[in-house]
Image: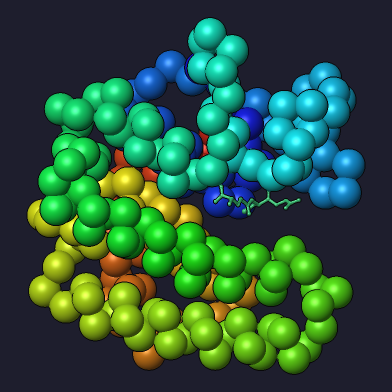
Amino acid sequence: MKLYFTPRTCSLAPHIVIRELGLDVELRRVRIGPDPVVADDGSDYRRLNPLGYVPLLELDDGRLLGEGVAIMQYLADLHPAAGLAPAAGTFERVELQQWLTFISSELHKSFSPWLFHPEYGEQAMQVARMRIDNRFAHVEHHLEGRDWLLGDRFGIADAYLFTIADWSRLLKVSLTSFPRLAAYLERVRARDSVGEALRREKAA
Ligand SMILES: N[C@@H](CCC(=O)N[C@@H](CS)C(=O)NCC(=O)O)C(=O)O
């Protein structure tokens, strides 16, 4: 398999999942932007993903899978014994999907314009900041008495929440009002899988 990724972006989440599972996946770096290209050969990335964004997973038989939450669930389901996602058809799985959707639509896509689209202007940034603060308060409340988002073990929702919430550091957003979230991010960062994914992205 190949994972098309860009360092420090949302593609880190499926990359962490790959490291958690110990999968032998080839990393292919993409330079995102108006004319996205695959970094090592300069080919037009839109020929693989017409939407131009990462992440994208290419299976060994050539099939392509886009959207981070779909990629993470696919990978977790290939190796159910690793326990990164509850079994499909259970209430716990739907709870996982509830969190994945929350992270995707309420956090990820609130951060995106702020991080990647300065042309939206100051007002849009202020709206994003307020929205993120409100959503972080929800996470902070949920983390009371918990180490991980769901159940008593690390899972794919944690890989995703870490990836997105850690953008706070890039944007110099203080997490002093969210001490549980801050401690949670350090807990996730301390995992071997996360260290390995960050190292490989830096070296790629
Ligand atoms: N819905 C997609 C969004 C992916 C996304 O926003 N990717 C960003 C990086 S975090 C990107 O590649 N942006 C470049 C662009 O939109 O042109 C997903 O969740 O996988």
Task: State the residue in front, 120 or 9.
Answer: 120
Please report the residue visible at 81 percent of the width from the left and 78 percent of the height from the top: 120
Task: State the residue in front, 71 or 171.
Answer: 71
Task: State the residue in front, 145 or 75.
Answer: 75
Q: How far across and how far down the image is residue 62, in percent?
A: 59, 13
Q: Is residue 141 above or below residue 181?
A: below
Q: How far across and how far down the image is residue 117, in percent?
A: 78, 68
Please report the residue visible at 26 percent of the width from the left and 47 percent of the height from the top: 155
Q: How far across and how far down the image is residue 139, in percent?
A: 31, 76
Q: On the rendered structure, is 199 left or right of 45?
A: left
Task: State the residue in front, 75 or 17.
Answer: 75
Q: Is residue 14 above or below residue 137?
A: above
Q: On the rendered structure, is 189 left or right of 1?
A: left
Q: How far across and how far down the image is residue 179, in percent?
A: 31, 81
Could you say which quadrant of the image residue 118 lies in? bottom right
Please report the residue visible at 21 percent of the width from the left and 39 percent of the height from the top: 88
Please report the residue visible at 22 percent of the width from the left and 76 percent of the height from the top: 142
Residue 186 shows up from this direction: no
- Seen as rendered, the residue at the extreme front is 89
Residue 149 shows up from this direction: yes
**In the rendered image, which quarter contains the C terminus?**
top right
